[in-house]
Amino acid sequence: MTIFQCSDTLDGILCGVYDAWMSRLGHGNVALELEDTGNRKLFAEYRRAEESREKTDKVIAAVYRKAGKQAYDMVFRASLSREEEKADKIYRFLVYALNCGPKVADMLQIPAVYEIFRMNRNVANEAHLLIEFARFSETKDRVLVSMVGPKNDVTILMAPHFADRMPEENWIIYDEGRRKGIVHKAGEGWMVVRTGDDAWKEQLRKGTDQEKFAGLWKTFHKSIAIEERRNYVCQRGHLPLRFRPYMTEFSDRG
């Protein structure tokens, strides 16, 4: 078995797909693996998939030409998953997609296709929930800031929604775990910025008005609550505990 290692990015995975496919070793004799997983297999040959724009473009062009935009969108969303095996699952999916064409999206009886469908659903569901639960605070410079901590790398899926809803605002959605942010400039577009350390997080937390309004917001929620109708089990079902540290209503600050 020859295992091609790639970076945990869409470009890295697609370059891994290119190298594995062009190796001509046979689909059953190759696999893709993310770097730094620490799960090296015995008797396997490891190769590093070198990234290049040319390789990425060739794979994307082939997917669009033979399988269509829907298949590419499925690959893109799957690449945002937190699953360590996603690179190899994307490769297996593309083997079918490039041979079966656009109809591959509906061939859920095939395990390789179902796995991509499942990851797509998981990523899309988390992005939808985060859009609903995101809370923004304002800095002294009138920049709206939202801190999030998603399992999957979904901030890029949140960006179009808020760019459409708040086109004339300067705002940042910051993923604490991945140390990256979506930065939107008023009246213009948005971009992904990787910070590399926690300096951004501390600066953004200190610079917002969250502490000023958190107390008022929680007091309002308590005042409209009906004690006899509290149902914490139901509440956890609609609002998972992992989202609450980033929500003003449940914040310990203020």
Image (cartoon, grey):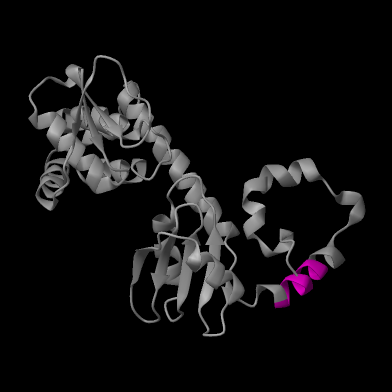
Q: Residue at x 34, y 67 (%)?
A: 191
Extreme residue in the bottom direction? 141
Q: 47 or 116, which is in the foreground?
A: 47
- Residues rendered magenta in the picture: 212-220
**x 9%, y 28%: residue:** 23
252, above or below 20, in the image: below
- In the image, 14 versus 61, the foreground residue is 14
What is the x, y in percent for residue 42?
29, 15
Query: Vertical placement of 109 versus 195: above or below?
Result: above
**Would residue 97 be counted in the magenta stretch?**
no
Tell whether position 213 is magenta. yes
- Relative to residue 119, is residue 173 depicted above or below? below
- The image quadrant of residue 203 is bottom right
Q: Nearer the viewer, residue 81 or 44?
A: 44
- The chief SS type of the magenta part is helix
| Residue 240 visible somewhere in the drawing | no
30 or 39: which is nearer to us? 39
